[in-house]
Amino acid sequence: MSRDDLEGAGGARPGAPRALPAPRMFGEKSWPSAAAAEALPAPLAPFLDFAARLRGAGFAAAPDQTQGFIAAVGLLGPRWLADLRRAAHALFGPPPERRGEFDALFDAAFLGRALAAPAPGPEEEMPPAFDAAGPELLAEPDEGEEPAGAAASVAERLHGRSFAATDEAGALRAFRRALPARLPRRLGRRFARDPRGARPDARRAFAAMVRRDGEIARLPRLRRRLRQRRVLLLIDISGSMTGATDGALRLAHALVHGAERAEVYTLGTRLTRVTRALAHPAPAAALVRVAGLVADWDGGTRLGDALAVFLALPRLAAHARGALVVVLSDGLERGGPAALVAAMARLRRLAWAILWLTPLRADPGYIPATAALAAILPFLDRLGDGSAPGRVAAEILAFAREVRP
């Protein structure tokens, strides 16, 4: 076949440059269709949503940048969300002056955090939302209100908080010093030397045989070590608990620094983990950090929904597995008790023990009046006095003394 025949048949001449495919327009066949998106694995959904949010906000987010972001995450195998954020900064390269807006879009896509936007009407009419939940976990206020929960509110109020000085420092220092010896313990996975242990120590036995020409005078043994159980502290920061919130957080600071393993969350209209903020050694500085981290101080009361969000996320629910769970709340909540009862039933299956401390228990004749608190009594190991930090500390230590490891 001649060269002219090759050219007539569409063949390229030897040595001629290969024709490149026509460039695709932005978005043309570069993004999965609706049917293709449904067939994608579920873990990819936040990455695609993040790219769409970036383009909607005016950031440069080409399809190959998104593909590179996904490939980088798969290659690096990040274990923490901060690794994803750093990869996003490297792949999309937001300008420094828009870094805050970029991070807000990242939080909205991967943490489900709603972006603040002006809306008509007073603040009390804004629909509530959870920081740690996606749109599918948002809950609307219940139309039916329980009369006994008149002090509770379903409205979300987002503002800061300042902490006043207190005279409970001595009691909290004593509580912190008593925690290592008084908190319940459980068998750990590591072993320690013990002549009366149930497990032979093969390594030491063979080493002794080598030194003594095959003879063993006494068989070395091991026992499982005891380690402190995790303590999970859930603090109700709704409007009905305003007077007890400051003391509860000061006690939480002492707990974080006195226990081997402790986790602290605040519950209101949102779910916020404050363990890292409380890790600062100075109580005043730690409380300032907490004040800047929590947004729903003295707002509504949605304990059941907040606990449902906590239990729906495996990385959070793991903090309750085998733990001593301490709930500081008055149990006042609008609406029916179904959400709180369902959440407490699941928490009961995960936790080692549940201690519910309420300020209302300071009254010797107190009887749970709300249907929600009365319904969850079978799931509690103790309903105690949470009226002051000293009383909370005494309740925790007394309960730990009564139970066995």
Image (cartoon, rainbow, N blue to C red):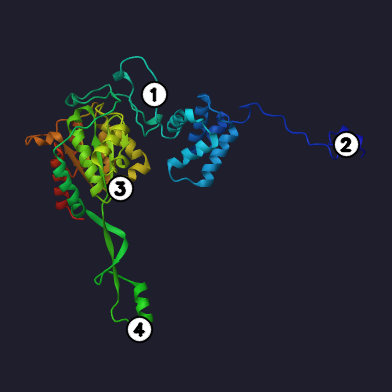
Give the mark toward the camera: 1 or 3: 1
* In this picture, residue 169 sits left or right of residue 20: left
Residue at 20% over, 34% down: 246
Rendered location of residue 317, percent (x, y): 33, 43
Lower sequence index among marks 1 and 2: 2
Q: How packed is label 3: few (under 14 Cα within 10 Å), some, or many (20 or more)?
A: some
Residue under pointer 2: 6
Q: Which secondary structure, mark 1?
A: loop
Lower sequence index among marks 1 and 3: 1
| Front position in the image: 108 or 103 | 103
Q: CA distance from mark 2 to mark 3?
A: 73 Å
Lower sequence index among marks 1 and 4: 1
Give the label on residue 116, or none.
1
Q: Amino acid at mark 2?
A: Leu
* In this picture, residue 34 sits left or right of residue 375: right
Q: CA distance from mark 1 to mark 3?
A: 34 Å
Q: Which secondary structure, mark 3?
A: loop
Give the mark toward the camera: 4 or 2: 4
Image quadrant for the N terminus? top right
Say if mark 4 contacts mark 2, CB within 8 Å: no
Q: How packed is label 2: few (under 14 Cα within 10 Å), some, or many (20 or more)?
A: few
Residue under pointer 4: 212
Q: Amino acid at mark 4?
A: Arg
Lower sequence index among marks 2 and 3: 2
